Image (tube, rainbow, N blue to C red):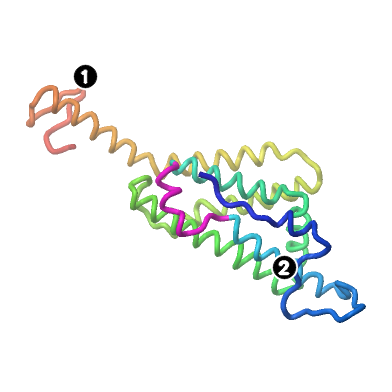
Amino acid sequence: MTFNHSPLRARIKKKYWTRPSTYFPGKGTPAFPYKDELLATIFHNFRRDIVNILPPIEQLHDIIVRMTPEQFLHRGVQNFMDHIDDPIMEKIWRIVYNEQYRDSEARDILLQDITYRTLDFLEIVFEKMMELKRIRRLSPRLLDAEYQYPLFAMVAEYNLLHYEQKDTKEVVQRMADHVDFFIENVQIELLLHSKNKMICKLYISLTFDLRIRRIAGGVIIAKGSC
């Protein structure tokens, strides 16, 4: 199951984007007579579009059930990279970065719509994964920060390299390695625990010895360790 994709590219190919409700040019007035009005229109439509980068919360359970944690996180990174690799989106992201210290709405987009919304979303994701016993029981708020903040830094590096037309293979690989490393560390105890459970059940069924269970190779699991 794939995440949602936005129809922004189709919208932007029109003569101009939908203007915010606060701006209604009169007859003969240029569509964008001032920079601030142009930026307001760009930000207005961009905020509507980036909502669709993440899947709807009401679909999360079904998605997580059908995908492993590793598949889910890799898919999320890929979908975001597809979004920022779009030539139009690349230009808009650059505008948002450039305007963040001058325009409060640009700051709100980066902080509220991108950073905090992503962290809040991942907190829900990790909580659901814990409920389904897909990952270890840890603080979901800690996990979302440990996972996402390094990705924010790598995406920023990627954008700068891409803008300068430099090779991005290394940073893309670091993103993939980051996902793998994160998953390995949040799953490792769960996987070992499940493996021991399976071994215990196998030898119980073979020996019916509930006091001491002997595993091939001489390793002994005492009663109660399973």
Query: Is 71 included in the stretch rendered in magenta?
Result: no
Q: Which of 71 and 104 is in front in this view?
A: 71
Q: Is residue 20 left or right of residue 220?
A: right
**Residue at mark 1 to residue at mark 2: CA–CA distance:** 64 Å
The amino acid marked with disc number 2 is Phe
The single residue placed furthest to the front in the displayed view is 27
- Check the image and report above or below for 137 versus 103: above
* Residue to which mark 2 is pinned: 43
Quadrant assignment, res 35: bottom right
Pick the quarter of the image with the C terminus: top left
Identity of the residue drawn at 68% across and 69% down: 107
Question: Neighbour class for label 2 at 10 Å: few (<14), some, many (≥20)?
Answer: many
Q: In this view, does 109 lie to the left or right of 217?
A: right
Identity of the residue drawn at 21% across and 24% down: 219
Q: Is the magenta stretch mostly helix, strand or loop?
A: helix
The disc, 1 or 2, on the residue closer to the chain's N-terminal end is: 2
Q: Which mark is residue 27?
A: none
Magenta region, residue range:
54-67
Could you tell me residue 88's position as x and y percent?
Answer: 77, 54
Identity of the residue drawn at 66% across and 50% down: 155
Identity of the residue drawn at 8% across and 31% down: 210
Could you tell me residue 137's position as x and y percent?
Answer: 34, 52
Could you tell me residue 64's position as x and y percent?
Answer: 43, 48
The amino acid marked with disc number 1 is Ala
In this rendering, which labeled residue sits more in front, label 1 or label 2? 2
* Residue to which mark 1 is pinned: 216
**Label 2: which secondary element:** helix
Q: In this view, does 149 lie to the left or right of 216?
A: right
Quadrant assignment, res 2: top right
- Check the image and report above or below for 4 versus 194: below
Could you tell me residue 21's position as x and y percent?
Answer: 72, 78
- Check the image and report above or below for 87 versus 115: above
